[in-house]
Image (spheres, helix red, strand yellow):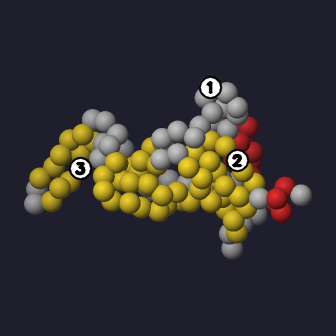
Amino acid sequence: MSERIGHVEILRLRIYPLDAESHDTLRSEVVVEPGRYDLYSDGMTTFWMMRGKLNQRGTWRMGDGLFALNQGDDPSDIEVVFPSRRFGPDEWAELIAGPEFTDGPDQRLRLLLDQEVTS
């Protein structure tokens, strides 16, 4: 069972796949605003839960055979809650050591662990 161990702070607007395990080029994506998102671990995997709006980039089915084409990232009115990819211990260590979590111009994420976890 996963328990909350802290937060991941997203520092810039990001686009994430709705299903992190999907590698389909037509997969649904989500526009996620900067903010704090709960971080979870079960001891073997680590992930965070996000909230965002479905992205209207690409071909958007409107119904009745109608489609829209949008070339830019544009949030729809449909809000979803979804998990990040699940990271094993080695993958997690590699991720938090990378440029996305490291202070500097490429930083996009910040790790905020609960006191109980760090002590």
- Asked if residue 113 can be seen in this view, the reply is yes
Furthest toward the top, the residue is 105
Of callouts 3 and 1, the N-terminal one:
3
Circle 3 residues within 10 Å: few <14, some 14–19, many ≥20:
some
Q: In this orientation, which residue lies closer to the viewer: 19 or 109?
A: 109
The CA span between labels 3 and 1 is 33 Å
Identify residue for label 2: 111
Looking at the rendered image, the disc whose residue lies closer to the viewer, 3 or 1, is 1
The CA span between labels 3 and 2 is 34 Å
Furthest toward the right, the residue is 119
Q: In this orientation, which residue lies closer to the viewer: 70 or 116?
A: 116
Which quarter of the figure has residue 59? top left
Up the image or down, 71 lies above or below 52; here it is above
Which quarter of the figure has residue 48? bottom right
Q: What's the residue type where badge 1 is placed?
A: Pro
Badge 3 vs badge 1, beta-carbon distance below 8 Å: no
Badge 3 vs badge 2, beta-carbon distance below 8 Å: no
At mark 1, the secondary structure is: loop
Up the image or down, 78 lies above or below 31; here it is below
**Mark identifier at residue 60:** 3
Q: Residue at 62%, 48% (x, y): give it.
A: 9
Q: Horizontal placement of 12 versus 113: left or right?
A: left
Q: Residue at 70%, 47% (x, y): give it.
A: 111
At mark 3, the secondary structure is: strand
Residue 89: % across, % down = 74, 52
